[in-house]
Image: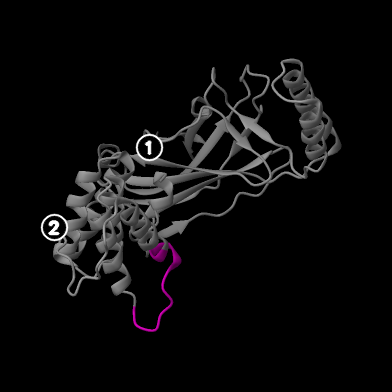
Amino acid sequence: MRLRRLLLFVGIVVLAVASPIALGQAFDLSLWTIAPADATVTQGWPVVLELSFANQRAMNDAAYNQWIVEDIAAIDAQVDAGEITPEEADRQKALLIEREIVPIRIGGEDEPWPRFLSFRVDGDPSPWSVQLAPGEIPSQLLLDETSVHVFYLVIAPEETAASWIGRLPLAAVLDTQEATDSQTWQGVTSSNVLELRVEPEPALDDELRAAKDLTFGLYHFVLGDFEEAIRRANAVLDVDPESIDAWILLGDAHFQLEAFEEAYNAYQSALNRIPAGAELPDFIVERVLLAMERLAQEGTEIESPETEPDPEE
């Protein structure tokens, strides 16, 4: 399972305003914040962001001609190379005519799309080094009628520790004006602006310490350090065993380590904390079912625990 399918928390505030499609802008680039509480950035704490790409441009005659000619030539080349039959070529060409949105290609093998990505604060380069989290990062993005690409970004705690106090409006910018690959969309587009607030770290009581552990747990999870994510989730549960966010983080980290029984128990604990009579959140139910599926594949019989599982397990 891809990391992004697991990275959904109850109570996460996602703050974003979809950018209006400006003249000539081929797609929507949206930047989101993911935090256990709000858009406040605490000095010395990490930040996890989400970047998404989606094609939202209706096809016009000029764009239609450009892309159809290129794609038909590519199909004909496959026929000439014996890779597809003429009948399959005719079928693919017929599908091209039905398109309502221009497919947009960003980046390629020689020029991966992240090289065109930068971050700005009030139009100036960001004081923070914003990095793509490790994971499945293709060199080229293909934005067609239905595709939405989502990637996680991280700002390390040492970056925020050196940050100033106050407003920090962050935006992502994709500039491919100097791209040399003819298949790469060329232009400049910006995401919505995230209004982050940077504050000094306060004296930590139990509640704030739990919030810090949850933030660091999410950060380590995105970086792929699942053992540390488990340690941080357990630290939260030691203080607040009712934290649904922490139970889900615990389950997600165990799932990534293929400890499916522990993941199942953690997800069940999250479900048990949904108020009686309330609708069960789909994203928790889906996790439970997926963990059950993996356990069944392993031949493990599932028994509902009579008591809550120990967070340390």
Q: Is residue 279 magenta?
A: yes
Quadrant of res 68: top right
Q: Residues within 10 Å of mark 1 (few under 14, many from 20)?
A: many
Q: Where is residue 235 in the image (x, y as percent from the top left)?
A: 16, 57
Q: Position of residue 242 (x, y in %)?
A: 23, 70
Q: Real-space Cα distance between discs 2 and 1? A: 27 Å
Q: Can residue 30 be seen in this view?
A: yes
Q: Which residue is found at the position 69% from the left and 39% from the top?
A: 25
Quadrant of res 84: top right
Q: Is mark 2 on a helix, strand or loop?
A: loop
Q: Is the magenta stretch mostly helix, strand or loop?
A: loop
* Residue type indicated by callout 2: Glu
Query: Which residues are drawn in magenta?
Result: 275-285
Q: Where is residue 229 in the image (x, y as percent from the top left)?
A: 23, 48
Q: What element carries label 1?
A: loop
Q: Residue furthest bottom?
A: 277
Establish if 122 lies above or below 208: above
Q: Mark 1 points at which residue?
A: 133
Q: Which mark is residue 312?
A: 2
Q: Position of residue 166 (x, y in %)?
A: 36, 50
* Residue type indicated by callout 1: Ala
Q: Can residue 209 be seen in this view?
A: no
- The nearer-to-camera label among 2 and 1 is 2
Q: Which of 204 and 144 is in front in this view?
A: 144
Q: Earlier in the sequence, mark 2 or mark 1?
A: 1
